[in-house]
């Protein structure tokens, strides 16, 4: 019942609706799944959530999980770090 109440709560819908943010803010986080998840996570914390989780966007960047075992530096340079480096400073603002 608690879970259903939470999912139906309009405050949750408002919190995760990243389209309520100006386009410039969404672009600062990056228009990737991870970037928009991070923006939604920030909004959830602002709405009172104590814990949030963001999953890495492995669908847009295939085989680009952080657990690298081969081709390490190119994967970091071309896929992982540019996305993360865009999202992290956006939290500061």
Image (tube, rainbow, N blue to C red):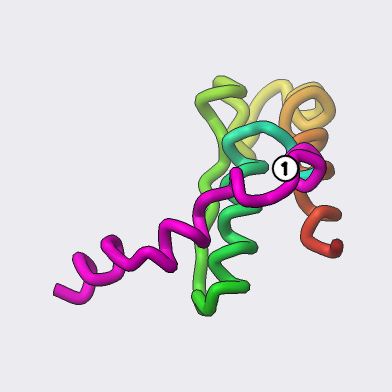
Q: How many marks?
A: 1
Magenta-colored span: 1-27
Quadrant showing the N terminus: bottom left
In terms of image quadrants, where is residue 91?
bottom right
Residue at x-position 79% and y-position 53%: 88
Q: Is residue 80 above or below residue 87?
A: above
Instruction: State the predominant SS element of the stretch in magenta.
Output: helix
The x, y position of residue 7, in whole percent, is 29, 62
- Residue at 56 percent across and 34 percent down: it is 57
Q: Nearer the viewer, residue 85 or 5?
A: 5
Question: Is 13 on the left or on the right of 88, as rendered?
Answer: left
Query: Quarter of the image holding residue 13?
Result: bottom left
* Residue 18 drawn in magenta: yes
- Image coords of residue 26 (percent x, y): 72, 42
Q: Nearer the viewer, residue 22 or 91?
A: 22
Q: Which residue has dot 1 on it?
A: 26
The kind of secondary structure element at disc 1 is helix
């Amino acid at each position: 019942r608690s879970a259903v109440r939470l999912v139906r709560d309009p405050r949750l819908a408002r919190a995760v609706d990243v389209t309520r943010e100006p386009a410039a803010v969404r672009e600062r986080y990056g228009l990737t799944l991870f970037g928009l998840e991070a923006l939604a996570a920030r909004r959830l914390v602002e709405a009172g959530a104590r814990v949030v989780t963001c999953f890495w966007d492995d669908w847009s960047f295939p085989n680009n999980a952080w657990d690298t075992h081969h081709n390490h530096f190119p994967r970091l340079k071309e896929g992982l770090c540019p996305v993360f480096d865009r999202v992290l400073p956006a939290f500061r603002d």
